[in-house]
Amino acid sequence: MPSPAHVEKLLAAARAAAQQAYAPYSQFSVGAALLLPDERILTGCNVENASFGLTICAERNAVTRSIAEGVRCWKALVVVSPTGVSPCGACRQFLSEFAPNLEIWFGHLDPQQAVHGPVSLCELLPSAMRFPH
């Protein structure tokens, strides 16, 4: 489990990432921060599209960035949004492909608001779809 200091760094990184979000349709900026095994932090933000199905969530943005850098396991994920929502169903399934036991915190863009977590991905998605390998 990450230390409280790591969680604070992840929250700050996720909030900074949310500032880069492209959310002209929903006005709902989301930021995500992954803690890598070597203690680096990779971030992502949501990127909307006029064809809403093409929108990329912050969590998937961070994960695909990590995969592109050759990292497929993580210590923790922090997601921040205007209302403190947890990852959507699509992101839960996407994350479960790589890290079914990932610990997740979710909080608000406003640092004065409460942070929830850790919650394991297994708790958020207890019956993830899996193919036998």
Image (tube, rainbow, N blue to C red):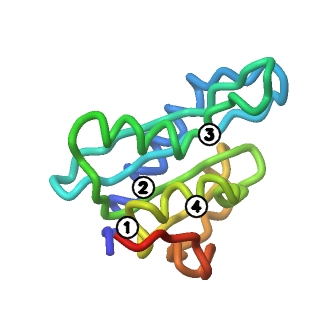
- Residue with the mark numbered 3: 57
- Under mark 3, the amino acid is Cys
**Can you tell which of label 4 and label 3 is closer to the viewer?**
4
User: Relative to residue 93, is residue 68 drawn left or right?
Assistant: left
Q: Does dot 3 land on a helix, a strand or a loop?
A: loop
N-terminal-most mark, 2 or 4? 2
- Under mark 4, the amino acid is Gln
Coordinates of residue 116 in the picture (x, y in percent)? 61, 69
N-terminal-most mark, 4 or 3? 3
- Residue with the mark numbered 1: 4
- Residue with the mark numbered 4: 93
Q: Would you say the residues marked 3 and 2 are in contact, meaning their CB atoms lie under 8 Å apart?
A: no
Residue 73 got which mark?
none
User: Which residue: 57% across, 70% down?
Assistant: 129
Q: Is residue 121 above or below residue 98?
A: below
N-terminal-most mark, 3 or 1? 1
**Can you tell which of label 2 and label 4 is closer to the viewer?**
4
Q: Would you say the residues marked 1 and 2 are in contact, meaning their CB atoms lie under 8 Å apart?
A: yes
Number of other residues with Cα within 10 Å of mark 3, as a class: few under 14, some 14 to 19, many 20 or more: many
- Residue with the mark numbered 2: 8
Q: CA distance from mark 1 to mark 2?
A: 6 Å
N-terminal-most mark, 3 or 2? 2
Coordinates of residue 101 in the picture (x, y in percent)? 42, 75
- Under mark 2, the amino acid is Glu
Coordinates of residue 123 in the picture (x, y in percent)? 59, 81
- Under mark 1, the amino acid is Pro
Q: CA distance from mark 2 to mark 4?
A: 26 Å
User: Which residue: 35% across, 40% down?
Assistant: 42
Quadrant housing the N terminus? bottom left
Q: Does dot 4 land on a helix, a strand or a loop?
A: helix
**Can you tell which of label 1 and label 4 is closer to the viewer?**
4
